[in-house]
Amino acid sequence: MNNTRLTRLARPLAAGLAAVSLAAAAACSSGGDGGGDSDTYTWWDPYPQHEDGSAWAERVDACGEEAGVTIERTASDTTDLTNRALLSAQEGTSPDIILLDNPAVSTLAETEMLTSVDELGLDVSGVDENLLAAGVVDDQTYGIPVGANTLAIYYNAEILDAAGVDPASITDWESLTAALGQVTGNGDSGITYAAIGTEEGSFQFLPWFWGAGADLTQLDSPEAEAALELWTGWLQDGYAPDSVLTNSQNTTWEEFLTGEFGFAVNGTWQVNSAAEAGFETGVIQIPARNGGIAPAPTGGEFIVAPAQADTDRYEVTRQIVECMTTPEGFVETATTFAYYIPPTADGQEALLEAEPELEPWVAAVREAKGRTSDNLGTDYPVISEQLWTAVQNALSGSATPSEALEQAQADAESAME
Amino acid sequence: MTTTSVDATGRVSGGAAGPSPAAPGPDRRRRRKPPGTPQTWTAIGFAAPLLAYLAVFYAYPLWRNIELSVHDYTVRAFVLGNPEFSGFEKYAEVFASDSFGTALLNTALFTVVSIAFQYAIGLALAVFFRANFRLSGVLRALFLVPWLLPLIVSASTWAWMLNSENGIVNSVIEAFGGEQINWLTSPDTALTSVIIANIWLGIPFNLVILYSGLQQIPSEMYEAASLDGASARQQFWRITVPLLRPVSAITLLLGFIYTLKVVDVVWIMTTGGPGDSSLTLAVWSYREAFGTGQPDFSPAAAIGNLLIVIALVFGFLHLRMQRGWEKS
């Protein structure tokens, strides 16, 4: 008797609990540990590959020592970092310093969780305007780029030689497509890039999008269509593998390192790896549609300082930020990572003295364009999501380029209302 | 024994109260003590940790999820904690979205097809391993591997095997003269691919539960049946299937709830793409909340709540069915 009574209770309870655990899964959260005692400053960055004891970790520690405090560093991946920053701000446990991916800065700044450089008393006059733009919201600057990177095209010199392609002859889309035809005609694979359905997909599509003269506020323009048709055409002609649809930038690079591809679109951060590849490599700038260099999007992190209840902490925070952003600091960051171009003219000069072979990358960074600039700010993530969706739809063949872009423009407009 | 008030005794402290508290009688020792006595407080004290646990880990997340879904949580509002109340607006947006129909259909296909195959293959393997032959223990253990591997590993491995250009599946197909299939990148096959991977992942769970269910069927039944001349097929349909019914039902229910909320496999393999072609409700919810640079917690929570309701409906359906069997 008692038993049936119990089970009668237990069953709905069990079913209820099972269902509720779905809620727990949906409402994900992670605790933040911020704002500790006055001698410990918390620091978050998106470089989990640099463990404790690495050159980067030591550099962070050194900046803390210089300011007379201990820095407690936590690393997590880029997307996770933005979410954690938002959650910690909501809980009032923000860290003292975050190194944040540049398109996320305006999103966080809009929540009023960041201090501006004026509040902290930092000088940003030396920073290149195109790089600083990602951190400017309503004429206030929230953070300083610790370095910048961007995209270019790496090529496999051996494959190009074999196919009789001179990399210097690639100056516009037409000559690039012709070169791809020659390479694939010679039995090698053409080009690989990342068209994955994430921010990386948009990041890689933007040089072509901007290179055609398209604008992010009008996704269904004829220029945008031309850029998407270029990518779809490469897939249809077999110049690019179908796997670009699921390729992240790392996977793309792995494909290139197999030595089967003539070209790969990738970033400054692969410079070292390219030098160590089992074949001779080179770099060309991404061409614009009718010649010239296409503006590539800037990548790289900003150093930002979330607002604290205890404003006395700002003084030390400022010292730590300054330690990271002196010309020597920039160069040290650049060489520690081997893929960061300093955001100031002084820093760039100093870097080129140390490593002259980075010249094409310094040039590319000077030409590069922030994703959230053109006053897009927090609209950028919304537009970007529609852009990568359009790229996915067109490349997979579920829609034509013009249909995909029209849909994207309509969805972006309704999402921004 | 008479029971006039099952409900009254169904409370937390009901066990101590005895079967018939409503009937005043000579049996005073077993009557419920008035509140406030030490015994009641002891009972509450013992129940408190559980209640606190339930409140913190079940009630609060659920409440928070509902709260998120009926407010307009922009990123700014999320941090500042001043969202506007929007009622069921977010639900309406979700229902009106172009993705909703696709996601609902994909969720139904993903769940039903996954479970059907997982259950059928799991049952076949369980019956197969019931006959204890040499090495059957080792082989059975090997079938558990998908369960033991971290999901990131198995999902990445599947993504690699199904890669269009250099995946092992396509190279086998091409070796036999077939054509390259763009498993993960074509809108026609992306959903199929993630379902195949998910079936593989779910077989061990079905195998283990159904195998232990089979152990509870007395072997005398089979002996008696074979003495009566029942064939293996007849034994399966007349003994195994009916006697396994309660275990099957709970396996299917758990499998259903589990499959309904699968995010990781799909996210790692296709991120719900290309476009929306392998988007399920759970993946959609994740995409809204964490998949883009602009977290949209309100619609994500609304989709999450929708999933809870679906799971609940099937949970109660299961209870009804079970009650029906108990009566018969």
Image (cartoon, rainbow, N blue to C red):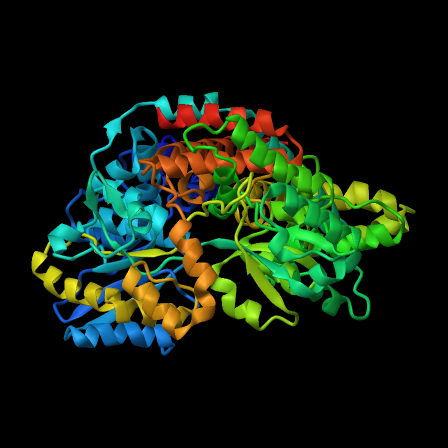
Nearest the eye: A95 or A117:
A117
Q: Which image quadrant: the C terminus of chain A?
A: top left
| Of A410 and B68, the residue lying toward us | A410
> In the picture, residue A59 is in which quadrant?
bottom left
Left or right placement of residue A331 versus residue A231 in this view: left
**Can I make out residue B248 in this image?**
no
The answer to whether residue B126 is left or right of residue A88 is: right
Q: Determine whether, in the image, residue B114 is placed left or right of residue B319.
A: right
Outermost left residue? A312
> At x 92% / y 47%, what residue is drawn?
B229
Task: Residue at 53% x, 30% y: name it.
Answer: A223
Q: Residue B157: give x, y in percent of width and height.
A: 65, 58
Q: Is B209 drawn above or below residue B87 in the view shown?
A: below
Front residue of this view, candidates B182 and A327? A327
Instruction: Give the residue at the far right of this rendering.
Output: B229
Residue A65 x %, y % = 19, 77
In front here: B74 or A416? A416
Number of disc labels: 0
A297 vs A344: above or below? above
| On screen, residue B274 above or below A321 | above
Give the x, y percent position of residue A149.
42, 57
Query: Residue A261 sits in which quadrant?
Result: bottom right
Q: Say if B102 sits above or below A298 in the image.
A: above
Q: Quadrant of residue A42?
A: bottom left
Rendered location of residue A197, percent (x, y): 54, 43
- Residue A167 in view of the camera: yes
